[in-house]
Image (cartoon, rainbow, N blue to C red):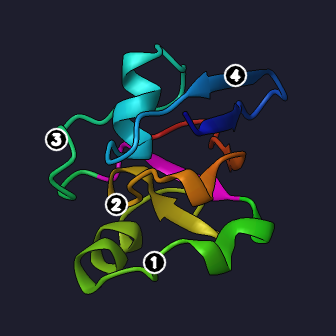
Amino acid sequence: MPKILFIEHNGKEHLVDAEDGKSVMQTAVENMVPGIVGDCGGACSCATCHGYVDPAWQDKIPPKGETEEMMLDGAMNVEPNSRLTCQILMKAELDGLVVRLPASQF
C-alpha cells in the first residue's frame, strides 16, 4: 500500500497509507489530516484541498488540467508546485509522495 507524507505548514508530519485509486484528498480526509478540507468532495470545484507537491514528485503526477488551473487561480498562496489534491489519484508508483499543506485554505 503506498504512503503519503503530509507536512503541515508548522512542520508537523503525517505519514498515512493510501489505497490505489483514491485521491490524495480522500486519503487526507479519511485519515483526519488537518489542512485538507475538501468541501466539494473531490469535484474540483472549491480548491479547499490545495497542497504543494514536493518538486521531486512533479514529473511523476499527471499535469494540471484546465479546470484545476482555473480553481487554483482563486486559491490563496499559490506556488508553482500547487495542486488540488483531489486531482491526484494514488498508485503504487507514488509511494512516498510528499505534500506540504498551506497555512489556510480560506
Which residue is tagged 4? Answer: 14
Q: Is residue 92 above or below residue 69?
A: above
Secondary element under disc 3, as helix, strand or loop, is loop
Other residues around mark 4 within 10 Å, as few (<14) / some (14–19) / many (≥20): some
Labels 2 and 1: the sequence-earlier one: 1
Secondary element under disc 1, as helix, strand or loop, is loop
Residue type (three-letter) at the residue carrying disc 3: Cys
Q: Which of the 4 image quarters holds residue 87? A: bottom left
Answer whether labels 1 and 4 touch (C-beta < 8 Å): no
Which residue is tagged 3? Answer: 40
Visible residue check, residue 80: no
Which residue is tagged 2? Answer: 87
Labels 2 and 4: the sequence-earlier one: 4
Residue type (three-letter) at the residue carrying disc 4: His
Was residue 49 drawn as part of the magenta stretch in this picture?
Answer: yes
Residue type (three-letter) at the residue carrying disc 2: Gln
Q: CA distance from mark 4 to mark 3?
A: 23 Å
Labels 3 and 1: the sequence-earlier one: 3
On residue 62, which mark appears?
Answer: 1
Q: Mark 3, mark 1: which one is toward the viewer?
A: 1
Q: Which residues are magenta?
A: 47-53
Q: Which of the 4 image quarters holds residue 58? A: bottom right
